[in-house]
Image: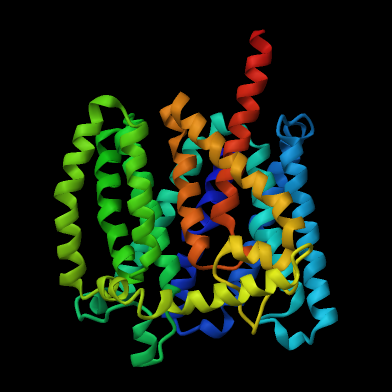
Amino acid sequence: MSRIVFIIAFFAYGGYYAGLAIIFALNLGEISRFYSQPLRVLMAILMLYVIHKNRFNLVFHKLSFFISLFIFFWIIYSLKVLYTITEFSSGTLSRPWYEYILYSIIYVVIPFICYCSLDIRRYWLNIISGFIYSGFILGIVSIYLYGEYLISGVGRINAISYETGEAVLNPLAMSYTGVLTILLCIFKLVIYKKNSKIEVIFLISTIFISLVLFLYGASRGSVVVLVTTLPLFIIFGPSKQKMKILLSSFIISPLLVWLVNASGSGLFTRLSKTTEDQGGGRTTLWRNAINHFFDNQLIGGRIEIGNIYPHNFIVEILMATGMLGAILIFPVLLKGFLLGIKQSKSNKEHLYALIILMVGLVHYSFSGGLYTTILLFIPVGIIFSLQNYNENNSEKQQ
């Protein structure tokens, strides 16, 4: 089971994009679906196997009420997909209607239930290792494929497509994979600390490799992730380590600025133009989606406007499912966030789940469709699983 859990975590995000990078490098982008779709189906099958093996954990789950809210929400969302193609022309959607339902099941519903069912106490290191190794492999592959562009001042990895026509990875995926990997490596170095010398060398090396992904992606959201998540190590970290973390931050910050400038990454340029370009045009998307919500407040309206999603999961929930959807799913997310803080306070080794959740919250506040929010609901599933164990353990002790 531990190997299966590792594989699922590996391909949940970064590992998937590592394989995609190799396909693009071979100029096989046209057949990428023959990689991505079978892989996602295979991962779904593995997760269904995990759910089956741990089904009794779900039957007697202490947070079954919130799990039920989660399932009801996605039923409502699926109905709204059908409503959109029934009431409006199929051209109002950016992809075939059935993909929204399938993707939401494979990317969100099954992963969430899978992690809710797991005994996280037994597999949490496998989960962390899966995410870290996926970032390491993606970093190695990216350096091999795009290393020459990093020092040429290309600005952002997708600029290669404009210059050469070559298909490249989504820069946002690279950037968020990089920052997530960096944070989890810091977690293992600062919080876990039960690492061998070889593991310490690997983790430090992975941080530097992941910085390359961070620079390639040049995502403003990744900067927000660092700013909002690094303080968690000071808040929840060991007292003896807090001063070291602060000093390290002062030392690393100028180094990071130098790396951004030296590499030619367009990160600072994009940050300086945030007001000018209205967050890459997101302000207009959010305004249109919010106006659509006000026109359909109770149950929402379409799932997309103008063939595009709003690039903010909160706005998208309101736009697509209205107050009904918000009442169902917001309590799940809020419960997960509050429990994540509580668990991190009681046991510092649980901080990793809150870290992944913070990455997901920022990521899907600026990019990604609601039906792909895998980094948002995996950590909530982990947190729910931890809480389920804690409550069962408390009952046994009484």
Q: Is residue 46 visible?
A: no
**The C terminus appears in which quarter of the rendering?**
top right
In the rendered structure, the answer to whether residue 254 lies left or right of residue 196 reads left
- 165 w.r.t. 36: above or below: below
- 235 w.r.t. 304: above or below: above
Q: Name which quarter of the figure residue 267 lies in.
A: bottom left
Disc tally is: 0
Q: Residue furthest top?
A: 398
Q: Is residue 181 visible?
A: yes
**The N terminus appears in which quarter of the rendering?**
top right
Residue at left offset 61%, top offset 47%: 333
In the rendered structure, the answer to whether residue 56 lies left or right of residue 357 reads right
**Residue 305 percent coordinates (x, y):** 66, 80
Q: Name which quarter of the figure residue 314 lies in.
A: bottom right
In the rendered structure, the answer to whether residue 365 lies left or right of residue 145 reads right
Residue at left offset 24%, top offset 75%: 150
**Residue 225 percent coordinates (x, y):** 39, 55
**Residue 298 percent coordinates (x, y):** 78, 62
Colour pattern of the rendering:
rainbow
- Which one is in front, 236 or 172? 236
**Residue 334 percent coordinates (x, y):** 60, 43
